[in-house]
Image (cartoon, rainbow, N blue to C red):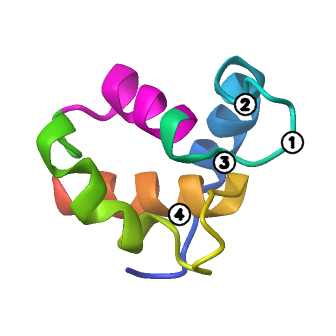
Amino acid sequence: MENYIDPNVLKWVESVWSTYDVDGDDRLNKSEARRFCDEHLNESVPHSKFFEMWAMLDQDKSGDLSRSELARAITWFKNQSR
């Protein structure tokens, strides 16, 4: 996955972040991230493939997602669909 983050995607992630970061730790755990993907990226990350794709989403292997990891993944998925 490329390191490029579309600034508009990052801005959008920032705007919806608090809706999905339920525990308020400024990271999305698998459950929070799966809910986000189900609601916004189902065509790009089907529910059945979510756990297989987790390693690609969680680039720093921390076990959760930062805002930039999520924005980077969305940018990448968006560019793949073009």
Which residue type does callout 3 highlight?
Answer: Leu
Query: Which of the two discs, 2 and 4, labels the residue nearer the N terminus?
Result: 2
Give the spatial CA distance, label 2 vs label 4: 17 Å
Query: SS class of the residue under badge 3?
Result: helix
Instruction: Identify the residue at image location x=84%, y=44%.
Output: 26
Query: Which of the two discs, 3 and 1, labels the residue nearer the N terminus?
Result: 3
Horizontal side, residue 37 vs residue 69: left or right? left
Which residue type does callout 2 highlight?
Answer: Asp
Query: Which of the two discs, 4 and 1, labels the residue nearer the N terminus?
Result: 1
Give the spatial CA distance, label 1 vs label 2: 7 Å
Q: Residues within 10 Å of mark 3 (few under 14, many from 20)?
A: some
- Residue pointed to by mark 4: 72
Disc 3 and disc 1 in contact, CB within 8 angstroms: no
- Residue pointed to by mark 1: 25
Depth-wise, is mark 4 or mark 1 nearer the camera?
1
Q: Residues within 10 Å of mark 2 (few under 14, many from 20)?
A: some
- Residue pointed to by mark 3: 10
Disc 4 and disc 1 in contact, CB within 8 angstroms: no
- Residue pointed to by mark 2: 21
Query: Which of the two discs, 2 and 3, labels the residue nearer the N terminus?
Result: 3
Q: Residues within 10 Å of mark 4 (few under 14, many from 20)?
A: many
Disc 1 and disc 2 in contact, CB within 8 angstroms: yes
Q: Residues within 10 Å of mark 1 (few under 14, many from 20)?
A: few
